[in-house]
Image: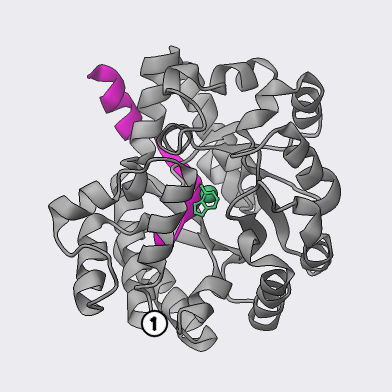
Amino acid sequence: SAMAAFVAELPKVELHVHLVGSASPATVARLARRHPGSGVPTDLTELREFFTFRDFDHFLTVYWAVQSLITTSADIHDLVVGLAADLSAQRCRYAEVTVTPYNHVLDGLSGDALLEGLASGRNAAATEHGVDLAWCFDIPGEKGTTAGRETLIFALRNRPDGLVSFGLGGPEIGVGRALFEPFFTAAREAGLHSVPHAGETSGPATVWSAIHDLGAERIGHGTSSAADPALLAYLAEHRIPLEVCPTSNVRTRQVESVAAHPVRRLLDHGVLVTLNTDDPPMFGATLNGEYLTVAECLGLTRTELVALAGNAVRASFLQDTRKEALL
Ligand code: ADE
Ligand code: ZN
């Protein structure tokens, strides 16, 4: 369609994509063959079936199975370069990528191997694909304060090139954001930006907690903010952007359909909305696809899509001069 062509041409920035969740089925199949007995299918047809989620918890089970396959710096390098190739095909030349060091180390990848794979992958992304990558190191919330402390120590001790932010992912129900306040305070004092997931699988109170307890400067998802007018006003007034991931929300059954997604309501309240993919192959999502689906299902115009792409540049942690060059 003409809209699809327009979206494909539009320069875009990605702010919410998990490195593990960015693995294409071909990459996952290769890793699964390399590590027999993992329980992850090695056959592409079976993998597509495996990637069909019943709900959010099932999604996490699949995500963790893929995660467990990643055990060498070469695995990390391949994931990073594969993601960069996919981003470049979406006309995306800058992305902030979420990495969960604590999970990798639990799966037997040393911290040094992780850093080596990230650094070499990031160099190859720039030189081979013209894609600049920045990192968000995030806490797997379900693993509690030990994971919080270890993630903080790992981030501050190593400070790899490209590290810009500190995050919190995993389930929200039963994993209060406030539990992680000391780690976010320390990360922010050290100059990292605060970008927790909140309001993906639980209500607006979690977003408020992300703001008040974790000093969130941007919110991962934040979808449920739409149910709280005072929160919408706050997000708009304080220009706290949301990393909205429409297809992800449909696939994990947080919203019934893209047509039922509150993107339009968020925009109408002046919230700085950005569009993102989260775990693209796992959700059958692409960055172009996210822009196209909100245009088709919610009637967003070309002008509105251009504004959304601009929002992502403004909401990024790029230097102001780099932002201006992209706007
Ligand atoms: N880890 C990977 N994807 C995630 C998501 N969408 N929400 C929370 N944790 C995640
Ligand atoms: Zn996410």
Q: Position of residue 187 (x, y in %)?
A: 77, 66
State the image quarter where residue 287 is shown. top left
Horizontally, residue 30 falls left or right of residue 163, namely left
Q: Confirm whether residue 8 shows in the render.
A: yes
User: Which amino acid type is shown beneath numbered disc 1?
Assistant: Ser
- Secondary element under disc 1, as helix, strand or loop, is helix
Residue drawn 81% across the image and 54% down it: 178
Residue drawn 71% across the image and 57% down it: 193
Q: Confirm whether residue 94 shows in the render.
A: no
Residue nearest the observer in this picture, 9 or 165:
165
> Label 1 belongs to which residue?
73
Q: Which residues are magenta?
A: 1-20
* Residue 86 highlighted magenta (yes or no): no
Horizontally, residue 19 falls left or right of residue 144, namely left
* Residue 4 highlighted magenta (yes or no): yes
Question: Which quadrant: the C terminus?
Answer: top right
Q: Position of residue 191 (x, y in %)?
A: 77, 65
Residue nearest the observer in this picture, 207 or 125:
207
